Image (spheres, rainbow, N blue to C red):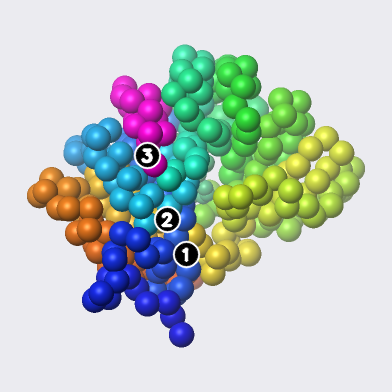
Amino acid sequence: MLPALAHSPGADPLRAPLFDAQGRLMTYLRMSVTDRCNFRCAYCSPAHWAGKKDHLSPAELQRIAQVFARMGVRRVRLTGGEPLIRPDILEIVQRLRAVEGLEQVTMTTNASRLQALAAPLRAAGMDQLNISLDTLSPEAFRRISPMGELADVLAGIDAAVEAGFPQLKLNVVVMKGVNDGEVPALVAYAHARRIIPRFIELMPFGQGEGIPTQALIERLMASGMPMVADDAPQGPHSGPARYYRTPTGHVGFVSPMTQNFCSGCNRVRVAANGDLRSCLGGREQSPLHVLIRGGATDERLAVAIRGSLGLKPDGHRFTEAGAHDQLLPMMGIGG
Ligand code: SAM
């Protein structure tokens, strides 16, 4: 039997654990703070994407995080678009760090602004950064992110290392004929800085052809790297990555295409404009901003959140024919 959804009559919508309709417990909130990006990578953002004008304010983001924390969410990841292009990003981090019940505030970033912001982010209470870097080759970088500068990213990563974050991870999306020859070099680059590299299978949001995790593991082993399955870096807020131990450090793999992990999904998303999205691969949304700006109480927000999670699909449909046409842009949802 499924756990009763807590918007059922009599249940306290703010206190009951946050289950979705499939009985999965939600403890992890991804908040997009902007649907704009200074990189516009081809696999993430459609060429025509203009973004929405109205973004949640720092106080509104805090309010939403507070309601989720009261419902048992313990970790928030800020994402986008590129979160560091928001001029008020440090205020956002400080406000989220002040939310009672939240154990971790983390961020995914392209690192382009970390030279200036790594130390202030750490001082504002940011616990952990996931940094996206797909290539060490300036030429491949220009193909993937024509609006970005590889030198800024590399300097930003060094600044993050210098700032002393307890854990840094590197997100690498591997694409056939673009960066798939660089996997050992990216592992070496990350391990030299005590960063955990994680190779992510390409999802069908934009252009490019991905490589299955198993093929990457075989290539790494063929390159002379011994690998032993070991999920030690998972910690209390485990995500979908599977880890391997190598002589120089851990390597992670996130495999949405070949090892569907939706049955263990613990996450819910809020887009930059305040639309609650229960699934990265779904289209249903619930406009939390309308409720907040209409003066809704925390209880009313909690009921809306639970209602939306009642519609969370059992899984994505990324591998089905025509999946790309069914998806909203990654950049608009918040990756
Ligand atoms: N701008 C930030 C960044 O670059 O990290 C945060 C947003 S970005 C959407 C978050 C993560 O999603 C990045 O690590 C990016 O590589 C990943 N991503 C974007 N499009 C993807 C796709 N089609 N398949 C797999 N991962 C993707």
Quadrant assignment, res 12: bottom left
Is there a contact, CB below 8 Å, between mark 1 and mark 2? yes
Of circles 3 and 1, the one toward us is: 3
Q: Judge whether 221 appears above or below 281 on screen.
A: above
Q: Residue 25 carries which label?
A: 1
Q: Earlier in the sequence, mark 1 or mark 2?
A: 1
Is there a contact, CB below 8 Å, between mark 3 and mark 1? no
Q: What residue type is labelled 2?
A: Gly
Image point (33%, 37%), residue name:
33
Give yes or no for residue 289 being in the magenta stretch. no
- Mark pair 3, 2: CA separation: 12 Å
Give yes or no for residue 84 being in the magenta stretch. yes
Percent across and percent down for residue 86 are: 33, 27
Quadrant assignment, res 302: bottom left
- Mark pair 3, 1: CA separation: 20 Å
Q: Which of marks 3 and 2 is nearer the N terminus?
A: 2
Is there a contact, CB below 8 Å, between mark 3 and mark 2? no
Q: Residue 72 carries which label?
A: 2
Q: Which mark is residue 99?
A: 3
In the visual, does 184 lie left or right of 138?
A: right
Image point (51%, 17%), residue name:
119
Q: What residue type is labelled 3?
A: Val
Is any atom of residue 178 visible in this view? no
* Classed neighbour count for the residue bearing mark 1: other residues with Cα under 10 Å, few (<14), some (14–19), many (≥20): some
Q: Which amino acid does label 1 sit on?
A: Leu
Percent across and percent down for residue 24 are: 48, 68
Percent across and percent down for residue 13 are: 29, 64
Mainly helix, strand or loop, the magenta region? helix
Question: Residues in magenta?
Answer: 81-100
Quadrant assignment, res 141: top right
